[in-house]
Image (cartoon, grey):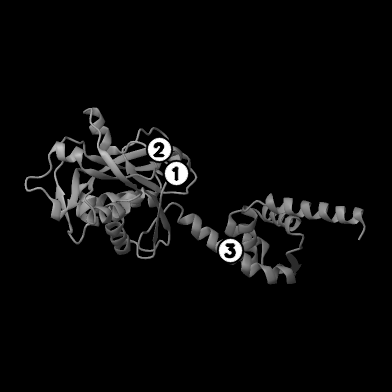
């Protein structure tokens, strides 16, 4: 085939694709009724249109599909061979499309197979995921849950793109289009090996003298509990820095280090009660967790339900 013929063939193919892309879906509804009735006047009556309007619509559809579609046989309209072959599949897809449009926006947790994508720091998973997974399994047995870390600086972009449905994180300075609500508060405590626990707790002097484990996903920089100490003009001795509280607890279990962490999270991780939980010798504001979502998802029924599920789980179980 010569170059000119290939170019002409591509041009014609592009024209055919453009015709399909410009197809008025109302023509398919008219086609459906004519195919069912096999009679132009009865189809027109069923559609509350004139026979002339139906005939004109079929003419436009013939141009789009490059097929005669129906031929007259006396007073009836008989489908062509191609029409007979293609119509059942087309009408099946039309029925599915209509069903989808009729259910647009509706959400049934008992039937949904949606994957709910939840962003949170790695350290929060032991506190939040067990109870949330249980609640999701009870109310949405076919749904799935995916937890992943998120970049706080890109939270708005990640939520807007739909990569995450919700984010749970500490209180952050956020504004529209990111929306948020408080979820829970958790006071800080100190964990140490039971063998080295002081009878009357830990004094400030002992706290500052001891070696500490700090938890952060960053390799350097101030962690949350150090902010309060710096405000008092004090600084502790950080001996080990790790990425999650589970690892930190195991380090404390086998060393003389102390760990400062949220108390509720400590109970979730230290299930064997191998560590002693002590009060802080200084005042530290509780850590506040918030739920974050994008304004585009605010009225979505599935997102609303997921937000309420998380809030109810916290209220009824405290994520424990």
Q: Secondary structure at mark 1?
A: helix
List the residue tagged with mark 1. Answer: 159
> Where is residue 235 shown, x and y percent of the image?
25, 33
List the residue tagged with mark 3. Answer: 93
Sequence-wise, which precedes: disc 2 or disc 3? 3
Residue found 91% across the figure and 54% down from its top: 3
Q: Which mark is residue 182?
A: none
- Distance Cα–Cα, label 2 vs label 3: 37 Å
Pointer 2: residues within 10 angstroms few (<14), some, or many (20+)? some
Residue found 20% across the figure and 37% down from its top: 208
Q: Is residue 41 left or right of residue 304?
A: right
Sequence-wise, which precedes: disc 3 or disc 1? 3
Q: In the picture, which quadrant includes the N terminus? A: bottom right
Q: Nearer the viewer, residue 256 or 178?
A: 256
Kindly indicate the quadrant of the structure image that contains residue 219: top left
List the residue tagged with mark 2. Answer: 178
Question: Above or below — where is 98 with respect to 154?
Answer: below
Q: Secondary structure at mark 3?
A: helix
């Amino acid at each position: 085939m010569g170059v000119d013929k290939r170019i002409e063939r591509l041009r014609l193919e592009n024209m055919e694709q453009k015709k399909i892309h410009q197809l008025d879906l109302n023509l398919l509804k008219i086609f459906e009724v004519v195919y069912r009735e096999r009679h132009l006047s009865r189809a027109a009556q069923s559609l509350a249109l004139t026979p002339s309007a139906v005939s004109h619509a079929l003419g436009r559809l013939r141009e789009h599909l490059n097929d005669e579609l129906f031929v007259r046989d006396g007073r009836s309209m008989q489908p062509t061979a191609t029409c007979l072959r293609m119509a059942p599949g087309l009408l099946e897809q039309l029925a599915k499309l209509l069903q989808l449009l009729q259910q647009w926006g509706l959400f049934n947790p008992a039937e949904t197979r949606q994957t709910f994508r939840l962003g949170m720091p790695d350290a929060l998973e032991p506190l939040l995921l067990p109870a949330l997974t249980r609640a999701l399994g009870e109310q949405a047995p076919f749904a799935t849950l995916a937890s992943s870390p998120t970049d706080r600086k890109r939270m708005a972009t990640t939520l807007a793109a739909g990569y995450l449905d919700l984010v749970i994180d500490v209180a952050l300075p956020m504004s529209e289009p990111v929306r948020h609500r408080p979820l829970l508060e958790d006071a800080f405590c100190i964990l140490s090996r039971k063998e080295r626990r002081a009878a009357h707790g830990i004094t400030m002097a002992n706290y500052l003298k001891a070696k500490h484990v700090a938890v952060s996903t960053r390799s350097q920089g101030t962690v949350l509990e150090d902010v309060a100490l710096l405000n008092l003009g004090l600084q502790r001795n950080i001996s080990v820095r790790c990425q999650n509280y589970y690892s930190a607890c195991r380090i404390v279990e086998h060393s003389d280090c102390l760990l400062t962490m949220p108390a509720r999270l400590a109970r979730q991780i230290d299930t064997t009660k191998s560590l002693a939980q002590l009060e802080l010798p200084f005042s530290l504001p509780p850590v506040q967790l918030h739920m974050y979502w994008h304004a585009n998802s605010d009225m979505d029924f599935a997102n609303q339900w997921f937000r309420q599920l998380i809030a109810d789980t916290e209220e009824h179980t405290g994520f424990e």
